[in-house]
Amino acid sequence: MKHNRLTATIAMFSSIAILGSLAACGSGSSSGSKEIKVAYTTSGNATLINNWYKNAKARFEKANPGATMVLEPIQVGGDDYNNKLTLMNKSSDTAPDVMTVDSTYLQPFAEAGYLQPLDSYVTGWKDWNQYYDTIKQAGKGTDGKTYGIFTGTDTRGIWYNKDVFKTIGITGNWQPKSWDEMLDVARKIKKTDPNVIPLNVYASKSAGEVTVAQGFDQLLYGTANGTLYNKKTNKWVVGSRQFKSALNFIKTVYSQNLGPSAQQALDPQEGHNLYADWMPNGKIGMAMEGSWFTSPYVKGGDAEWANWQKHVGWAAMPTQNGQKPGVATMSGGWILAISKRSKNPGLAWKAIEALQTKQSAINYYVLASQLSVRKDAVTDKTYLGTNPSIKFFSNLVQYAHFRPLTSDYTQISAQIGIACESVMTGQQSVNAAAKTYDTAITGIVGESNTTTVD
């Protein structure tokens, strides 16, 4: 899947460093250790990202005479990397000092006692006010404490084929104002050319987080007050009419033949087929996808497409009925964190500062194909020059929602995929699928940990 390819790319370019110590919670505390270990994952040719770390190392050591940054690359990625981090954090002898953690694992790592709260550090950090508020919130645990600084992020929206749209009379920049408008366009495409897939929305359980983040969540969080998790009460939402609305959109797409066939949607290669075949060959009208979608089209990409931007347009996913803020998008990313076992968390924080100067952050965004999490970086010419859609998707960060990354999130996510696929294939009605989901969630977290939206 394209999402998996992106995950691997991000992992390759991600930095990691783990520092420990239950003591020394204040920003100035120190045990006297002047060596900071920074571990990061590598995959394939990591020359560019290794150089990025080496530059940060030079900056850090120049700003902190007598201190040393030891770079420790980890030769694995994906889940193997997260498992490696878990093992390393179990002992002060093996834990690095600063680590980059997939944001999906922020809460589990925090609950396990691996992460040092960063609130006392960010309070005095002059760059902190440059980070979007949504990004700041996403770096917090359910206890309200900040545990991570995002190194970059992504957003999601709609990619459409301009040539297909021309056949139904739509030219120029297109921006739907509601779900109904999207569906009306899809119906026109279907009527004009039955061989073209009007709209792709991921809905198979085998696609995992792709179905949840690119598909279902963009719908749910586009409804009024729609959410999976109540952050104020720290409870999972059940009995949600918003949940049913999202499922009903999926049902409409597939029951009216406005999406791929069931066989195409259940194909593990659906994401690859979408960007490598359907879009370049005019076989699809539009797709709900991530900001990284066109990265394979650039020179050297695995689906090179010269002048792709003449044929492909992009738009924000609208809210259900056009209600404020008018758009809905989901984000994710990687965070820099300090290990609870760090002997010198204050110096470890200085290492994060060296990694996250404005220019260093911009360099990382370019290398890792990430969106900026800093307001002062989104006008940089180098950053904006990486892709003509960068500015647009960067502007969506301010509206972004983040998945409720609790320790039981992966189990919840699996149930969403089951619900989406059952509706997509017609195995269950929307009401039945929603009820099955509610029952499963209650069984996972317990009735006392569930609530309703309304």
Image (cartoon, helix red, strand yellow):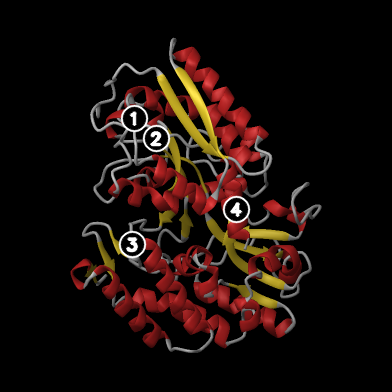
| Residue 198 in the figure: left or right of residue 324 | right
| Kind of element beneath mark 2 | loop
Check contact, mark 2 vs mark 3: CB within 8 A: no
| Kind of element beneath mark 3 | loop
Q: Which mark is residue 95?
A: 2
Q: Amino acid at mark 3?
A: Asp
Q: Which mark is residue 389?
A: none
| Kind of element beneath mark 4 | helix
Separation of residues labelled 4 and 1 (CA atoms): 31 Å
Q: Amino acid at mark 2?
A: Ala
Q: Mark 4: give few (<14), some (14-19) or many (20+) Cα within 10 Å.
A: some
Separation of residues labelled 1 and 2 (CA atoms): 8 Å
The residue beneath circle 4 is 6
| Residue 134 in the figure: left or right of residue 59 | left
**Residue 186 on image: x %, y %:** 62, 77
Q: Is residue 358 above or below residue 442?
A: above
| Residue 243 in the figure: left or right of residue 210 | left
Separation of residues labelled 2 and 4 (CA atoms): 27 Å
The residue beneath circle 3 is 408
| Kind of element beneath mark 1 | loop
Q: Is residue 431 above or below residue 54?
A: below
Whichever of labels 1 and 2 marks the residue nearer the N terminus, that label is 2
Q: Which mark is residue 342?
A: 1
Check contact, mark 1 vs mark 2: CB within 8 A: yes
Separation of residues labelled 4 and 3 (CA atoms): 24 Å
